[in-house]
Image: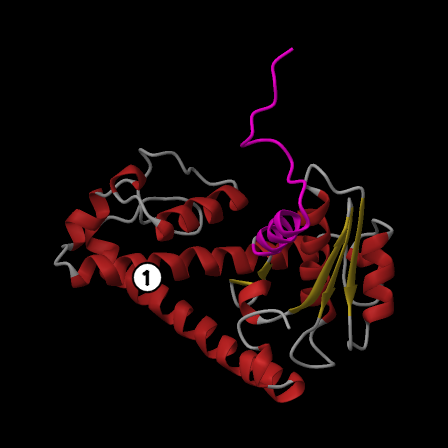
Amino acid sequence: MTPVSAASAPPTGAAERSEAVTAALGTVLDPELDRPITELGFVRSVSVDGGRVEARLRLPTYFCAPNFAWLMVEGARRALAGLSWTTEVTVVLEDHFSSDEINHGVACGQEFAEAFPLLSDPDRLEELRRTFLRKGLLAVQERLGRRLTDHGWTAGQMAEARLRDLPGRLTTTLVRRRKALGLPAAGGDPVFTDERGRAVLPAGMEAHLLRCRTTAVGIAANTEICEGLLVTRYGPDTKGGSA
């Protein structure tokens, strides 16, 4: 039998498990803002008792769209259930007009359309999720493009760049977005692509980056509004982390 390495062994201490929970929740994005719910202050609290984990979430307003809220609650539950050592996972959305329906539906493994039959058809929520992933794909290319432009890269050089040529956090994020969309994400694949994974040619790079910038500005504006609403609702200590 192959021994389990220390690196792969599940955490045993309370502090280590709390850190693992926070890291798992950090993989859950607000679908519209393309940022982790932990950074946005949407995680009010977490508690760990052995293998039992509870996370309590909150949103900027009482009337945040239930489909967006569902995606975050469902994502949080999946992320925590994916930890090897959890035996019971509870995710609670607080102070939302659809809290009861969302909390019950996610806990029971329902689809959004089952919990809210008047608000969606079975395929709409998945398409909404993919729409925001595509926007996130463009937004991270905007940040990469701005950084490369500041370093003097030409449109031709950016068109020729491959993922393995640009190691770093932004490239890691870009790869993660592509994988979530089922797009090519190997080291030899181009850095700059459209939402279908098609490489951007030098002649189209300027227009592509302009579209990326437009998308990124829209996401940033929505983020600022939501952060302001969250602070107004819950106080100045809520921004950028759980209370």
Q: Residue 192 magenta-drawn?
A: no
| Residue 17 belongs to the span the image colors magenta | yes
Amino acid carrying mark 1 in the image: Arg
Viewer-closest of 152 and 58: 58
- Identify the residue at horizontal 87%, vertical 60% (top origin): 104
Q: In this view, does 122 lie above or below 94?
A: above
| Apparent side of residue 123 relative to residue 24 in the rendered image (left or right) | right
Colour style of the rendered protein structure: secondary structure
Q: Is 28 placed above or below 182 here?
A: below
| Most foreground residue, 19 or 203 | 19
At a point 73% along the width and 44% down the height, the residue shown is: 81
Magenta residues span 1-26
Residue at 68% of width from left, 50% of height from top? 14
Q: Quadrant of the N terminus?
A: top right
Q: Residues within 10 Å of mark 1 (few under 14, many from 20)?
A: some
Please name whichever residue, 42 or 238, is drawn nearer the observer in this view of the structure.
238
Instruction: Name the residue: 43% across, 55% down.
Output: 137
In percent of width and height, residue 50 lies at 78, 46
Instruction: Write down the residue under mark 1.
Output: 143
Image coordinates of residue 173 in percent, x first then y, are 43, 50
